[in-house]
Amino acid sequence: MSRHLGLAEEDTALLRDSGALPIDIADGMIENVLGKFELPLGLAGNFMVNGRDVLIPMAVEEPSVVAAASFMAKLARPAGGFLTSSSAPLMRAQIQIVGLADPANARLSLLRNKARLIELANTKDQLLNKLGGGCRDLEVHTFLDSPRGPMVVAHLVVDVRDAMGANTVNTMAEAVAPLIEEITGGTVRLRILSNLADLRLARAQVRVAPEHFETDAFSGTDVIDRIIDAYTFAAIDPYRAATHNKGIMNGIDPLIVATGNDWRAVEAGAHAYACRDGHYGSLTTWEKDREGHLVGTIEMPMPVGLVGGATKTHPLARLALKILGVKTSQELAEIAVAVGLAQNLGALRALATEGIQRGHMALHARNIALSAGARGAEVDQLVRQMVQDHDVRSDRAEALLKALREQ
């Protein structure tokens, strides 16, 4: 595997070593460190993104996630895999202004001084400017009837390049706050980024022919119709949409975690974006084209970076990025949404045909066997018996293990 991945000996040593994150580095990452918490790190295969073969590192504890993503990527390959695109890496910094008697006038005063505010913001990160990024625009929003009176919120729109961008935009927001108070006569309260990164979107598309969905029980055309019905359920019902979108994030989050990015920020932005039309709905769409092929799309915020934070300090995060072979944050964002689209397809296909439990429980049985104390060949024997009996339970695993060891 190391030869196939192009890994050096020190890279494979990191994968072999359960202590890849040294305790002294962990102690510098967060407060009150008492140890390290590990997750399984797997590789999803078969992914082709914009014509390039990609192996996807995924840090996750849930069974079937890696397998489902890999299988759906395999089905997508005959039609070219996943096609992706993305917008510029723009993040928003919000500056809240209160104590205003004239919010409409304050808004226009800020817009009239846009150039001054942008220039001041850009003095705070000269390296970002040299890399082609920096503050690009100013938006001003008014809330005339809040419970605390009129409120104005200024947005700095910042191109953060290959960073996630939180520290950069927060610093800029704090830098312009005194000038904003001077211009408006109001008082600045919060100065913080928004995790609804709706200017930093990543998109993916996939197309699968009916013959790739055929099974002994279902025709490919029938499976496609069932998948579209399942998607429509999520599009109209927020109770279903929550689980539908959780399945999308089952694919995205493990990649975000493996690369040392902020999965909480990605989750927050995803679910807020799913409500952008005033109704919580699906982050994906599934349709049938003129040839009867299933076509899926996804578009969502994806604020990820290649520099700063754990992406630089965690040795396995750096290795995950090396395995991916990405050069920009936008490329990482596009791969992430492609994985999310694949994961969603896997869940919809299973739900629409044999049900989610058949494949999931077979993999879940391994966890049950391990938790019961099985080791080595015992695990396979317990799994085989529980799946055959359609009885995957902890007490059943314990009883089977006891009987096996008594033989």
Image: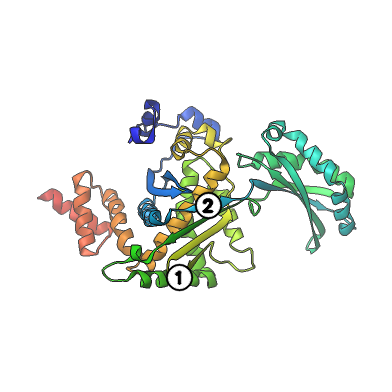
Residue topped by disc 2? 84
**Residue positioned 71% across, 35% down in the render:** 129
Which residue appears farthest toward the front when viewing the image? 291
User: Helix or strand or loop: what does disc 2 sit on?
Assistant: strand
Among the 4 quarters of the image, the one containing residue 207? bottom left
Q: Position of residue 108 (x, y in %)?
A: 87, 54
Tell which of 91 and 40 is nearer to you.
Answer: 91
**Residue positioned 70% across, 46% down in the render:** 192
Residue topped by disc 1? 228
* Crowd tier of the residue under label 2, counting other residues whose Cα lies within 10 Å: few below 14, some 14–19, many 20 or above: many
| Mark 1 in CB contact with mark 2 (< 8 angstroms) | no
Tell which of 192 and 7 is nearer to you.
Answer: 7
Rendered view: 141 above or below 132 = below
Among the 4 quarters of the image, the one containing residue 135? top right
Rendered view: 289 above or below 137 = below
- What's under tag 1, amino acid-wise? Ile
Rendered view: 267 above or below 26 = below
- What's under tag 2, amino acid-wise? Thr
